[in-house]
């Protein structure tokens, strides 16, 4: 070995000592780069245990660490890059997923530790805007991950990602707090019973029924009716369900959240006068930073988990929109130094989605039935975000722009929508045969559309003409006026059961009705008009 190579280690060590002397810092051992923020495999000793604390978290100025031997660690901001903040600690480096609080900020600015960069520096994701945050600001380690109030006190209230009330009704007072990062239930604790959740929406109950305690996805592009459908489900299922519901608004319009809140007050689901409210609301609207949008779904899920695990309730969890959860992770992924994967999404897309979805399940104590709206970018179901979500769902309801352009609402595609419990052993032989028969007629009609477009209806055989006639009647009968959309349609909302078979009635009589009796009444009115 040459003399130059023998001197190389001493030169490197000398350079490190010189840099440390100039910066006033001791040489530190470089910590390993952490895995993705939100990965379940990291920091299992931190906030992942299913733990409910009876003590309310103390303010940052007087907070103490969770371990008796630990002391409050304080660091200073060394870099601010949008929603990503680097904080350097002299000692007491906080573990991954711990929450830090910036001192002297009103409202509170909470940072979540995402990576260890070395040199006693952690990279954090901000849960609120970082405007006004400068290098040198002091941040305090709270000693635990983000904790929120849980329990009956959350019913009828609106909270943000860190558990603060945003409904101008004062703070949410609770003796019990829980970390938003929890372990998924063990396999032996899960419930395997199968039961249909009746929604009162014809096309759903007939062709793609929902399972009680399952995960349901509402897929659709912009403006095809995802939010209206989820609001109708809240209206129908929550009232008939009688239990507790949790609504997590993830990256959607503030106006929709405000409208939903007032509609729930008018319908009695939320009561401002007493403690009879049945729903808790968690909002992280689209103007929130990506850190809040990436964590608000976990906040809503934590509220639902308490009712399932501690009170043994059957809980309904509505998430609108789960795509924004993925989108928020994609926004901060590049700032965290990760190499993008397909279509620019974060490389940990499957891990982030799986960590959250595995917590949404039914146990022997209670159940969480989740209804998730999923935005489909450019109406492309093969996009990595909706495609990753597909694997976790028990039922998928696909909303089609082509059907909505025909004026048929809800614009559910009866051929693309699926359900795991569409099985004769679950729904019954008659239901199964009717559903498959309906889908066969609609599929035959779809295969004939090219011939109709080129040659016209006159070139079809009599059997094919009958198939087309039946299919068009079925498509219109599967439309339904919604109670939450009465102001737009001018028709009273209906809830009903799946249809029968009527070949002699004009197809216009099937449009926007509830029960089959309404079809017969419409047919009588049409007959009377024709006689005049």
Image (cartoon, rainbow, N blue to C red):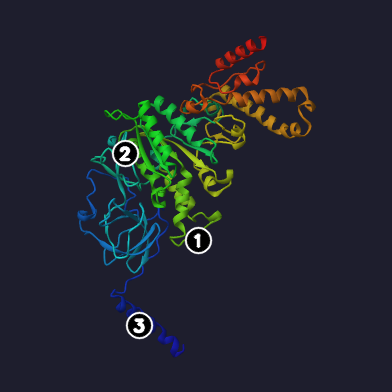
- Name the front one of labels 1 and 2: 2
Q: Residues within 10 Å of mark 1 (few under 14, many from 20)?
A: few
The quadrant the C terminus occupies is top right
Q: Relative to 82, does residue 453 appear above or below in the rendering?
A: above
Residue position for label 1: 339
Q: Position of residue 281 (x, y in %)?
A: 36, 37
Residue shown at 32% from the left, 79% from the top? 17
**Disc marking residue 417:** none
Q: Position of residue 430 (x, y in %)?
A: 58, 21
Q: Secondary structure at mark 3?
A: helix
Query: Separation of disc 1 and disc 3 at Cα?
Result: 33 Å
Mark 2 or mark 1, which is nearer the start of the sequence?
A: 2
**166 or 101: which is nearer to us?**
166
Residue position for label 3: 14
The answer, for residue 188, to whether it is visible in the render is: yes
Residue shown at 46% from the left, 28% from the top? 484
Q: Secondary structure at mark 2?
A: loop
Which quadrant of the view contains residue 141? bottom left
Query: Separation of disc 1 and disc 2 at Cα?
Result: 39 Å
Q: Secondary structure at mark 1?
A: loop
Q: Residues within 10 Å of mark 3 (few under 14, many from 20)?
A: few
Instruction: Tell whether label 2 touches label 1 (CB within 8 Å).
Output: no
**Disc marking residue 167:** 2
**186 or 293: which is nearer to us?**
293
Mark 3 or mark 1, which is nearer the start of the sequence?
A: 3
Mark 3 or mark 2, which is nearer the start of the sequence?
A: 3
**364 or 286: which is nearer to us?**
286
Q: Position of residue 316 (x, y in %)?
A: 40, 33
Q: Residues within 10 Å of mark 2 (few under 14, many from 20)?
A: some
Instruction: Tell whether label 3 touches label 1 (CB within 8 Å).
Output: no
């Amino acid at each position: 070995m040459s003399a130059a190579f023998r001197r190389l280690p001493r030169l490197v060590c000398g350079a490190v000592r010189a840099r440390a002397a100039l910066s006033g810092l001791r040489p530190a051992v470089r910590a390993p780069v952490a895995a993705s923020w939100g990965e379940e495999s990291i920091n299992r000793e931190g906030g992942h245990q299913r733990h409910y604390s009876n003590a309310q978290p103390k303010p940052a100025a007087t907070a103490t660490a969770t371990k008796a031997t630990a002391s409050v660690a304080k660091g200073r901001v060394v870099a601010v890059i949008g929603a990503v903040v680097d904080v350097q600690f002299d000692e007491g480096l906080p573990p991954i997923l711990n929450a830090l609080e910036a001192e002297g900020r009103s409202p509170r600015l909470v940072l979540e530790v995402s990576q260890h960069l070395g040199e006693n520096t952690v990279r954090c994701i901000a849960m609120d805007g970082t405007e006004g945050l400068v290098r040198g600001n002091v941040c305090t380690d709270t000693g635990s991950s983000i904790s929120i109030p849980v329990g009956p006190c959350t019913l009828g209230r609106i909270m943000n990602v860190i558990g603060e009330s945003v409904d101008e009704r004062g703070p949410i007072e609770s003796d019990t707090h829980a970390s938003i990062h929890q372990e998924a239930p063990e396999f032996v604790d899960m419930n395997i019973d199968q039961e249909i959740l009746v929604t009162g929406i014809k096309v759903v109950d007939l062709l793609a029924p929902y399972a009680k305690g399952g995960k349901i996805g509402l897929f659709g592009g912009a403006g095809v009716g995802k939010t209206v459908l989820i609001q109708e489900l809240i209206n129908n299922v929550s009232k008939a369900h009688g239990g507790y519901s949790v609504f997590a608004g993830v990256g959607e319009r503030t106006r929709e959240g405000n409208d939903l809140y007032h509609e729930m007050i008018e319908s009695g689901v939320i009561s401002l006068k007493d403690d009879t409210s049945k729903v808790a609301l968690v909002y992280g609207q689209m103007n929130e930073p990506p850190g809040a949008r990436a964590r608000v779904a976990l906040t809503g899920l934590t509220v639902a988990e308490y009712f399932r695990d501690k009170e043994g309730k059957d809980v309904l969890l509505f998430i609108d929109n789960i795509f924004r959860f993925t989108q928020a992770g994609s926004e901060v992924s590049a700032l965290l130094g990760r190499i993008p994967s397909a279509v620019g999404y974060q490389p940990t897309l499957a891990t982030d989605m799986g960590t959250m979805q595995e917590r949404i399940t039914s146990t022997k104590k209670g159940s969480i039935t989740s209804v998730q709206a999923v935005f489909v970018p450019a109406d492309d179901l093969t996009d990595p975000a909706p495609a990753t979500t597909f694997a976790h769902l028990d039922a998928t309801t696909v909303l089609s722009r082509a059907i909505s352009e025909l004026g048929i609402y809800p614009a559910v595609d009866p051929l693309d929508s699926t359900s795991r419990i569409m099985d004769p052993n679950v729904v019954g032989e008659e239901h199964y045969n009717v559903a498959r028969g309906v889908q066969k007629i609609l599929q035959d009609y779809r295969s004939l559309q090219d011939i109709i477009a080129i040659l016209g209806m006159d070139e079809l055989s009599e059997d094919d003409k009958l198939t087309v006639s039946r299919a068009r009647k079925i498509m219109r009968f599967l439309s339904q006026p919604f109670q939450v959309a009465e102001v737009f349609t001018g028709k009273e909302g209906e809830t009903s059961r799946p249809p029968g078979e009527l070949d002699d009635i004009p197809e216009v009589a099937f449009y926007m009705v509830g029960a089959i009796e309404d079809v017969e009444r419409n047919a009588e009115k049409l007959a009377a008009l024709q006689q005049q």
